[in-house]
Image (cartoon, rainbow, N blue to C red):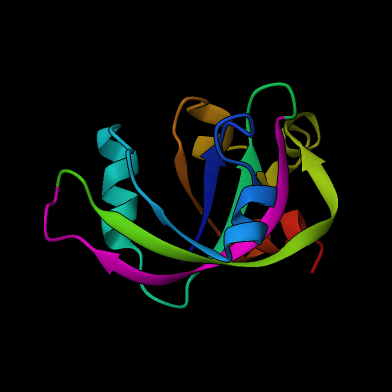
Amino acid sequence: MDYLLKTEPTVYSFADLQREKTTIWDGVTNPAAVKHLREMKPGERLVIYHTGDEKSAVGTASVVAVDASDPKTPKVKIEVRKPVAKPKTLAEIKTRASFADSPLVRQGRLSVVPLTAAQYGWLVGD
């Protein structure tokens, strides 16, 4: 499974992840988002999405490790990969039929969103 992780760039941006190389993705409280974090497995691909004024998919990362010892607050260690060649905006995403049923479009406040392989490929330009 691939996932999209939303972050407010003024709090933690893809540039921060590039500088740090790895980080622990935690602090998620929405039950559906927490469930997705617990289900992640090392090696899975991630898209980093900036919320706020940007509203666009800006980079990629991968899951290094998952600590779900506390099921209410799982901690996922992620590792930076690369920026996307051309960031995809939410407006562009909403025009794609492949995202019609996606929680990214249907549940705007969800901070961890599962992606199909096709969705991931389009977001990162594969």
Is the residue 64 above or below the residue 102 in the image? Answer: below
Is the residue 43 above or below the residue 78 in the image? Answer: below
Q: Residue at 39%, 76% (x, y): give it.
A: 42
Would residue 92 appear left or right of 31 to someone viewing this image? right
Q: Position of residue 56 (x, y in %)?
A: 73, 38
Query: Seen from this angle, which residue lies furthest top?
Result: 53
Query: Seen from this angle, which residue lies furthest right?
Result: 86
Q: Residue at 34%, 41% (x, y): give it.
A: 33
Q: Residue at 72%, 32% (x, y): give it.
A: 90
Inspect the magenta stretch and tell me whether residue 35 lies in it.
Answer: no
Tell me the magenta residue range.
55-71
Give the quadrant of the C terminus.
bottom right
Would residue 43 appear left or right of 105 to someone viewing this image? left
Is the residue 18 above or below the residue 58 in the image? Answer: below
Query: Along the line of sight, which residue is nearer the eye, 95 or 66?
Result: 66
Inspect the magenta stretch and tell me whether residue 62 lies in it.
Answer: yes
Q: Position of residue 106 (x, y in %)?
A: 52, 28
Q: Position of residue 66 (x, y in %)?
A: 29, 66
Query: Seen from this angle, which residue lies furthest left?
Result: 70
Would residue 124 appear left or right of 32 to someone viewing this image? right
Query: Seen from this angle, which residue lies furthest bottom?
Result: 43
Count up the numbered dots.
0
Q: Position of residue 88 (x, y in %)?
A: 79, 44
Dominant SS of magenta comes to strand
Q: Residue at 35%, 59% (x, y): give it.
A: 76
